[in-house]
Image (cartoon, helix red, strand yellow):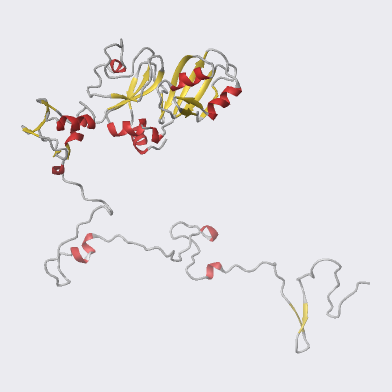
Amino acid sequence: MENKQPSGRPVRKFGKPQKGNIKSRRTDGQNYSRPESSGRREDNRHERPYRSSGRPGTGKTGPDARSERPSGRLIVKKVKPEDRPFLRTDNSSGRKDVKPRKRGARGAKAAEPETAGIRLNRFIANSGVCSRRDADEHIKNGLITVNGKLVTDMGTKVTHDDDVRLKNKRLSAEKKVYILLNKPKDYVTTVEDPHAEHTVLELLGQDCPERVYPVGRLDKATTGVLLLTNDGELTTKLTHPKYKRKKIYHVHLDHPVTKNDLFKLTEGIELDGEIIAADAVAYADTEDKSQIGIELHSGQNRVIRRIFETIGYKVKKLDRVYFAGLTKKNLKRGKWRFLTDKEVSMLKRGIF
């Protein structure tokens, strides 16, 4: 026989009592049955204010519909010019001498007039004949004339229309040029060298009329990535030691390198009183331990060859494969190309 409570509800051994057909006793002595419930709270979200059952014109309903409740952001509506009070032609407001406002780019600065010009030493350097420092010396020594007048003031400003001459030779500000060269062997990284058989500028031929110069230096036997430009400011950023521009080399040595010597390279080796430590070093070929990939930012002369000679190795071949975000990909040995605008922007902003 099943046990029942005084309320008439059956006793359960485990779990909660059933919710269906629960009988309760009313105060007037009569019984009533509570309607069955699914156990979930009814969702009245669509009856709340600022809610909609769907996006207008999309046919979406339910949870995917976007709320029409204000988000707290300022909503700016586009107004036609004829509806703006300050542009109405009928002058319904009664104001006199009402002029339309000039609208421009928000936050844009007014462009400087071209008549302001640039400093004379910068104009001379941009012409490609020398650096700014040498230009200051030319001005100081009285070798520069502007529109036929001798100029010795360092702060003089000129425009592109002025006649600027160095030793009676007219100068013109050249455009900035940026060239990536895959340097071959037996070419000297310099502009002029009377003792050199070949210089890297010979590889440019007549296709680059602007006067450019190498950024940094690769010795005669070293190959790989080399940048040439006439932008003095960028050259300083890429070569000064404080900027620590990354360079990666592929080194071929006369015999396999031990792991202990790889650790020595990362810990640092003393050269000329300075500790030179590789930023990263690894085997370039897992089967050939005589090929090493090394990354460092030191700018000392022949630094790669000297640090390996210090620990008992001789460099047979040295190739620079990376310099300041630039590689020699798809560029054959001895060939060159102009940098893209994206690459130039990357170098100037230092994002590499």
Decide: is 211 above or below 112: above
Residue 74, image x, y percentages: 37, 63
Write the residue at 29% across / 27% down: 229
Q: Position of residue 288 (x, y in %)?
A: 57, 16
Q: Is residue 104 above or below residue 84?
A: above
Count of marks overlaid on the render: 0
Residue furthest out toward the right? 1
| Left or right placement of residue 159 versus residue 255 in this view | left
- The quadrant of the image that shows the N terminus is bottom right
* Residue at the extreme front of the image, as rendered: 273
Of 24 and 87, nearer the camera is 87
- Of 84 and 59, nearer the camera is 84
Image quarter (top left, top right, bottom left or bottom right) of the C terminus: top left
The residue positioned 45% from the left and 64% from the top of the image is 68
Could you say where residue 338 lies in the image, as x and y percent from the top left?
31, 26
Quadrant of the rendered image containing residue 211 = top left
Between residue 85 and residue 238, name the one nearer to us. 238
Q: Is residue 164 visible?
A: no
Q: At x 46% / y 60%, what residue is drawn?
A: 55
- Residue at x-position 55% and y-position 67%: 45
Q: Is residue 245 left or right of residue 93?
A: right
Q: Quadrant of residue 237?
A: top left
Image position of 262 (left or right of 186)? right
The reply to whether residue 103 is visible in this rendering is: yes
x%, y% of residue 47? 53, 70
| Residue found at the far left of this picture | 148
Q: Would residue 30 be found to the left or right of residue 352 on screen?
A: right
143 and 73: which is toward the camera = 143
